[in-house]
Structures are given as C-alpha cells and as structure tokens.
Amino acid sequence: MKEILLRNKMIFHILEGCNQALFKEPNNVELLRTRGIAFNLAKKYVEAIDDFLKVLKALPEDASSYYLKSDCHYQLGEFEQAKQDFMRAALLEDNPDIDKAEIENVIVPEETELKDIVKILEFEKNKAILRSFPDLISDSTID
C-alpha cells in the first residue's frame, strides 16, 4: 500500500512538472510523450490519448506512441481502435520509412485477437516507463 501511495505521489509530481513545462513549451514532443505516459499510469487514458495524438501529429513515424495510444484504447475498452493503433505501430517498426497514407489506412486482419497483442502492449508500455521514469520501476510498483 505504501508503495502505491509513493508511486501515485511521484506520478502527480511528474504531471505537475510536465504541465508547468508545457505552459512554456506547448509543442515540446518529449514533454507531451512524458505527460502521456504519466496520464496512462494515472489511468487518465483520454488525456493520455490526447497527448499521444499531439506527438503523432509532430512525429507520425513514432511507433512507441502508437503502442502507448493502443494501450490506452485497450484500457478504455475501445478494442478496434486498440488493434488499429497496434497494427500501425507494428508496421512502423517493420518499415520506418513507410508512407503516411499506408499508416492512416492500415487494415487490421480479421484474425487479430486482443490476447495476441496484450503482452506486447504491456511490454511496450513498461519499456516507455523505464525510459521516462526509471525510479517508478520495481517489482512492487508495476501493475
């Protein structure tokens, strides 16, 4: 319980710091991504999606933001959108120079199952957390 309270306090401070910095630099992609990850950790998925959309507008080839956005849609029960963003991320990882129109119009194969992508989403989310907030990572603080 103590670890959860400490984790929540750290997330609150991260969000507060990001908000202050974004007031000065509203288009800073790294700050937007960091805040998006913090919103995801705080289970504020709609806010996280908004930040990841801003990142993707500036960096449409950012597979990590598609994975993170996919995780948010999954957590909200928006499974088709989660699958679509997952496929976009996978396409970008395979071919970073892919045409933007191909990413926007990605087709999700009918046989794509959520259970097939959940572990990858969890891995990608934890990888992003580790890069952005190494102090939050421990066996007792990851959901």
Image: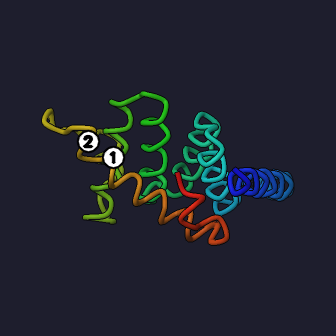
On residue 83, the disc is: none
Which one is nearer the viewer's eye here, 23 or 43? 43
Give the residue drawn at x 31%, y 39%: 83
Q: Farthest residue to the left: give it.
A: 111
Query: Is 127 displayed left or right of 120 in the figure?
Result: right
**Three-letter code, disc 1:** Val
Q: Amino acid at mark 2?
A: Lys
Crowd class of label 1 (few under 14; some 14 to 19; many from 20; radius 10 Å): some
x, y (%) of residue 77? 43, 27
Closer to the camera, 111 or 55?
A: 111
Where is 51 relative to 78, above or below? below
Locate residue 50 relative to residue 71 in the image: left or right: right
Q: Quadrant of residue 137?
A: bottom right
- Provide the residue designation for mark 2: 115
The location of residue 54, given as percent across then percent down, is: 60, 47
At horizontal 73% and vertical 54% (from top left) the residue drawn is 2
In this image, 80 relative to 15: left or right? left
- Residue 25 at x, y = what percent? 80, 58
| Circles 1, 2 touching at the beta carbon (< 8 Å) | yes
Neighbor class of circle 2 (other Cα within 10 Å; few <14, some 14-19, many 20+) is few
Label of residue 118 in the image: 1
User: Quadrant of the rendered structure where residue 48 is?
Assistant: top right
How many numbered circles does the render carry? 2
